[in-house]
Image: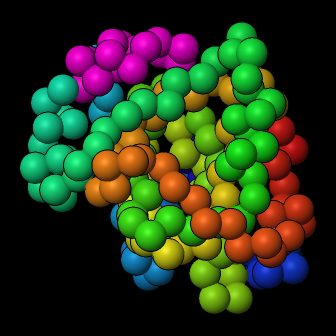
Amino acid sequence: MSELVIYSETAQQQWQSRDPQQIAQQLQQIGVRFEQWQPSAPVKAGDSQDAILAAYRADVDRIVAENGFKTVDVISIDRDNPNKTALREKFLSEHIHTEDEVRFFVDGCGLFYLHVGDKVYGVLCEKGDYLSVPANTTHWFDLGPEPQLAAIRFFNNPEGWVAQYSGNPIANLFPKLDA
């Protein structure tokens, strides 16, 4: 079940909900779009990018047309992925992107942390969740030690995922997905 926990920068919990409407309302206040969609095709973590994009072709085409995205790809990782530890580490440090970070989760889960002002928003995203994080929002992401995740990613930058790391160690204060 999707969840939002709002913390202070010192990791003191201030608010929590698993209600999708409350999650969307809280995130909307910081410019983040959160929606829950019904996945329309059976796919699973570990499936190929081609299989996942084919299963969601109509949804992908609609989102690309609405937002003018230039590149679409899939992150699909399961527990057997030999690079799972390195992939997890790549996302765990606070960073920004100069474009919106847009994800539609088609299987599994992942934990986004958004650092906005003096608050940190922990967003547990699961199958059916659509999350759009505005450009230049400091954040990090945890796919867990035993990942089970498939998400469609949308980009305006044709080169795809480009992170600019902040060097702030704040991510070390917060619970990981396995906690």
Image height check: is 40 above or below 14? Answer: above
Q: Nearer the viewer, residue 108 or 154?
A: 154
Q: Position of residue 172 (x, y in %)?
A: 88, 62
Q: Quadrant of residue 74?
A: top left
Residue 17 seen from this side: no
Q: Nearer the viewer, residue 126 or 141?
A: 141
Residue 145 seen from this side: yes
State which quarter of the image contains the C terminus. Answer: top right
Q: Position of residue 129 (x, y in %)?
A: 42, 44
Image height check: is 59 above or below 142? Answer: above
The colour scheme of the drawn protein is rainbow
The residue that appears at 31% across and 49% down in the rendered structure is 158
State which quarter of the image contains the N terminus. Answer: top right
The residue that appears at 68% across and 66% down in the rendered structure is 165
Q: Is residue 175 magenta?
A: no
Residue range highlighted in magenta: 42-56
Q: Is residue 90 left or right of residue 116?
A: right
Q: Quadrant of residue 38?
A: top left
Q: Position of residue 67 (x, y in %)?
A: 18, 58
Image height check: is 103 above or below 93? Answer: above
Q: Is residue 134 left or right of residue 148?
A: left
Q: Is residue 45 magenta?
A: yes
Residue that sits furthest to the bottom in the current view: 117
